[in-house]
Image: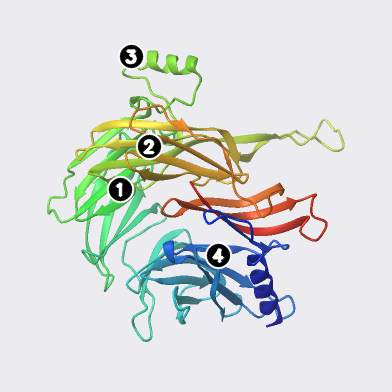
Amino acid sequence: MKQLLLFLGLFIGAFFNTYGQSDSTKVLEIPAIYPENNYLIQSLGKEGLLLTKSEKSPILSSNNNWTFIRLDTNFQLLDSTTISISPKLYLVGRSQDKGVSYSLFYNYKKDELQVLALNTKTLQSKIHHLFTLKKLLISSFVVVDGHCFVTGMLRRIPIIFHFDLNQKNPRVKALSASLTRKTKISAISISRQNQEIYITVMHQKYRHFVVKVKTFALQTATLKHEYTVYDGKEPIIFDAKLKTVGNKHLFSGVYASTFRTLPEGFFVAQFDAKADNQKPDFFKFYKFTDLENFFNYLPKKQQNRIKDSKKDPNYTRTSRVLLRHPMWIDDQLILVGEAYYPVYQQDNPLDPFNTWRTPVRGGHILEGFIYTHGFMITMDKEGELLWDNSIKHNYFKLRNLRVISALKKRGNEWLFYHGRESKFYAASFTKTETPKTFPIRRVPVFYSKDKIRRATRESVFNWYDNYFLASGYRVVRNTENTDDKGKREVFYLAKFKF
């Protein structure tokens, strides 16, 4: 209890020091000295945001308390609550639906599972205790109208669980999806209109993958029907994302002409979920070389070589890409992705005794990922390519592979943006026009003379309207301040207008 009061005291004290900041720029700092001070953020739009933090007691290790703090758009403290979860359970999934935040707690070595339902306005909560299987590696957690769906791996076999929180004593039920060790769950999509959940699975045959969609009833989680999206040996589909729009299923992913090679292009497809024959409305394959602006990040000489090579119909060029779920905006099919390549360092340990009989073994260690550019592709209702564009990322490196940039539509313009090293990068374009790169903007700091020495776990996203929210951890120095604000380690929230 003393720790909670101290935390709230530091929190409120940090807020009341936000003087001198304009209405469009707000910065909140919370002391975060220890690595376990990990704050989670849930955006509530114009209603503010919800901060979540684990309160672990160094003395009573059996306690598993979680603090939830509700703030408005100016970082004013509205309300807070602390909830106790069963000991030795860990947060493994989060979902949000109709003003309720759901948190899934589980332990790999225990068969106990808990779901915390928290009203984001009143902070009223309810904990659901359930029992499931041990040694389940949970990968996703989705809640719709109180119906929870959990996917994961159990002894290297994909599995899907369902339980209804609207029942007094909910029970965990495994969906009959006929999954094996050669099957992976590629995407999940839910339709409130049809009261159905669609699960895209990819089953590996000898030299290719078969893509199927299984439809389950949202209320009873019973299998209604399934159909095959693709079962071809050439080209080979490596990934399939699913987006449901009304009764239409939109698919996107990457492909290659041979098995276990880098992708050489992408595909788009559309199916009618209610049709009996389950034939595609369209199924299009495009090479990366078919895109006009995909390789704009390269120097002019290399771009000219690619243009000359396009005259050869058999010419292909591979690329590693992260392709997101397809979007349907203004009667156009939109694909957004990022290109990258991994970098390795040579591991060549020498014999410490310098004896010629011991062989020297070398290897490679993954060092990180270099991001080259982000790209956007637009197509019409029939899947025909309209135009594309790309934004150069200046070859920056991250330790872990993840989506780094976001897309926002402003009138006729498209805005690409991302944040790193406490800086805000943005560019805009209209159709095939050359992207307009905005000057690099510094993410706001608490004091004007603050110098950021180190920043980790940062993220930037569009909060509401034209306001953006940046968050992360900083080590800050300020030579003009002689008190404890001179050097500090903090978790920060920064609101700014762009």
Q: Which residue is mark 3?
A: 311
**Labels 3 and 1: the sequence-earlier one:** 1
Please name the amino acid that badge 3 sits on.
Lys
Q: Which mark is residue 75?
A: 4
- Position of 248 compared to 311: left or right? left
- Pick the quarter of the image with the N terminus: bottom right
Which is more N-terminal, label 1 or label 2?
1
Residue 212 shows up from this direction? yes
Q: Secondary structure at mark 4?
A: loop
Q: Residue at x 85, y 38 (%)?
A: 352
The residues tagged by marks 4 and 2 sit, at their Cα atoms, a distance apart of 34 Å
Mark 4–mark 3 CB contact (< 8 Å): no
Task: Provide the residue designation for mark 1.
Answer: 211
Measured Cα–Cα span from mark 2 to mark 3: 24 Å
Marks 2, 1: nearer the viewer: 2
Above or below, 85 against 428 in this view is below
Q: Residue at x 73, y 34 (%)?
A: 348
Viewer-side label of 4, 2: 4
Give the quadrant of residue 345: top right
- Residue 445 drawn above or below residue 351: below
Q: Quick check: 229 left or right of 294? A: left
Q: CA distance from mark 1 to mark 4?
A: 46 Å
Q: Nearer the viewer, residue 296 or 175?
A: 296
138 relative to 198 in the view: left or right: right
